[in-house]
Amino acid sequence: MQRASMKHLIDILRAEHHLESNGYKALLECDDDSVVAYLHEQAREVAQGVFARGIFVRGLVELTNVCRNDCYYCGIRNSNTALERYMLTTEQVLQSCQQGYELGFRTFVLQGGELPRDKAQWLVELVSEIRQRWSDCAITLSLGEWPREVYVALRKAGADRYLLRHESHNAEHYAKLHPAEMSLENRLQCLTWLKELGYQVGTGIMTGSPWQSLDNIVEDIEFIERFKPQMIGLGPFVPQHDTPLGKFATGSAELTCRLYSIFRLMFPNALIPSTTALNTIDVKGRIKGIMAGANVVMPNLSPANVRGNYALYDGKAITNAEAAEGIEQLETQLSTIGYHIDWGRGDHKQCTIHNA
Ligand code: 5AD
């Protein structure tokens, strides 16, 4: 397609928040740098129209690397015996939150492997304790698949948001990334329950996961378009050497940023993190993500001695601006591009502020 018609396509996406499948495909395929620059610029303008130049921060607490699941790409998969497993105590989690609160965080993200089902009660009590201690904070969970009643109990205990990437909306592709016990159907069922229960829900994919085609990504975009999540989580696939997919190529930072821009134009109000995985494969990843329309960063509040063990993939950035103590560094980094930290809870705004 000509440069002018590609730019026109981007204008349509910005104005109508929707394209036909071949429009999305054309944006993913485009190899004209000036068109991609235009896409990022449009997305950035839209993000600035909604959030000004504020970036929300979420304090990430990695509860545990124990996992009952066995996803082929993930370093904390159950079959990985090379990993020392840990589980934070309630006290350690609360201390991490306290430290985060003092630093100014008003959202805590409790993330972890999928714990054995008999740990559900512990999770519910933990959420309830955090809710009581820090009533002004949002609680986000990223704890994988559970029966509906567990999601109900966690929501009642005070959880506000839930992150659960669908990973791939193509059942065949999904099956190549996950063991037979897991299914796309169950993943989608969980996402539907979470939404029904009034969570603000996040979903998403890894870009460049093994066997992923551009058509698969178009399917993912169209699923996300229908599902309308409040949060969209996207990071490049990064191989982890002790997993069955450890020899596959790393995903692309460029494609990840392109998707941030496409989703920003589709969903002006969405909360889109510039992810750790992106910053791991590209030293300027975080800034590039923000320049492409992302508006959230999730620094790590976990105790320093366990961070190395939450090894979903190789080379994960665990220090400096990636860690909560590096918040000043983050502020400095953001200020170099004229952005700043927004210390608000950063709930998803229902109203659409239209393009200026
Ligand atoms: N590379 C990049 N992201 C990964 N995740 C798990 N393993 C990897 C990997 N090797 C992502 C998955 C999951 C999230 C918690 O981390 O998308 O949903």
Image (cartoon, rainbow, N blue to C red):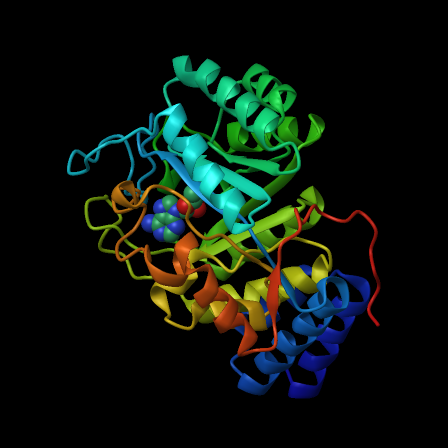
Q: Is residue 292 above or below residue 319?
A: below
Quadrant in the rendering for residue 193: top right
The image shows residue 253 at horizontal and vertical percentages of 43, 68
What x and y, as percent, mark residue 6?
67, 79
Residue farthest toward the front in the current orientation of the protein: 102
The front one of 2 and 348 is: 348
Q: Residue at x 64, y 33 (%)?
A: 160
Image quarter of the C terminus? bottom right
- Residue 43 vs residue 67: left or right? right
Q: What residue sits 34% from the left and 37% below the top?
A: 71
Identity of the residue drawn at 61% across and 29% down? 159
Q: Is residue 251 visible?
A: no
Locate the N terminus and report the quarter of the image it occupies: bottom right
- Determine the residue positioned at 74% across, 67% down: 13
User: Image height check: is 227 above or below 26?
Assistant: above
144 or 31, nearer to the observer: 144
Q: Indicate whether 87 appears above or below 11.
A: above
Q: How many marks?
A: 0
Asked if one can make out residue 250 in the rendered structure from this viewpoint, the answer is yes
Outermost left residue: 82
- In depth, the one of 67 and 119 nearer the eye is 119
Expressed as whole percent of the image width and height from the top left, the position of residue 300 reads 41, 49
Residue 174's quadrant in the figure?
A: top left
> Which percent across, then down, holds residue 226?
70, 45
Q: Quadrant of residue 64?
A: top left
